[in-house]
Image: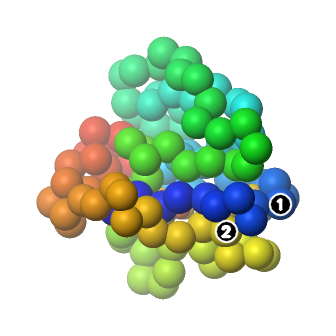
Amino acid sequence: MAYIISEDCIRCHSCIPVCPCNAIYKSGETWAMADGTSHHDNKRQAAISGNTSYIVPNKCTECMDSASEAKCVAVCPVGASSKDSNYIESKEQLLEKKKLLGI
Ligand code: SF4
Ligand code: SF4
């Protein structure tokens, strides 16, 4: 399961530097798998949200190696980041994603 940012986001950008996968982008910003990872795909992709900061599901590993809660959740002042029930993944899938990202 990836995380998702809701409309409550106030675009403070606190979550962006703490994400170990570089999965979080500013509203309207383009993204690429290769941004901040070892993934080979550096093709720029259209922004997922123009209103809030957003998480790229293909890059979010749920902070699965972290002993505490997800880092984006821990720093968000308004509780805008949460698990996305529409994007469910097993631990094995998350591990494979982490391997693909080389992080
Ligand atoms: S759960 Fe972790 S990996 Fe996913 S977006 Fe938040 S900080 Fe990044
Ligand atoms: S920390 Fe919360 S309010 Fe700030 S940009 Fe991230 S999701 Fe939005």
Label 1 with label 2: CB-CB less than 8 Å: yes
Q: Which residue is mark 2?
A: 80
Q: State whether residue 5 is above or below residue 43.
A: below
Task: Determine which residue is flagged by label 1.
Answer: 10
Q: Is residue 75 visible?
A: no
Q: Position of residue 52 (x, y in %)?
A: 73, 49
Is ligand 2 less than 8 Å from the beta carbon at label 1? yes
Q: Choose the circle earlier in sequence order: 1 or 2.
A: 1
Q: Is residue 93 left or right of residue 1?
A: left
In what element is the residue under mark 2? loop
Disc 2 packing (10 Å; few <14; some 14–19; many ≥20):
some
- Front one among 55 and 39: 55
Q: CA distance from mark 1 to mark 2?
A: 9 Å
Q: In the image, what residue occupies the spot 20% across and 66% down?
A: 91
Question: In terms of depth relative to the viewer, which is nearer, 42 or 76?
Answer: 76
Name the residue located 45 percent from the left edge and 69 percent from the top edge.
83
Amino acid type, callout 1: Ile
Q: Residue furthest top?
A: 43
Q: Would the CB of label 2 be found within 8 Å of ligand 2?
A: yes
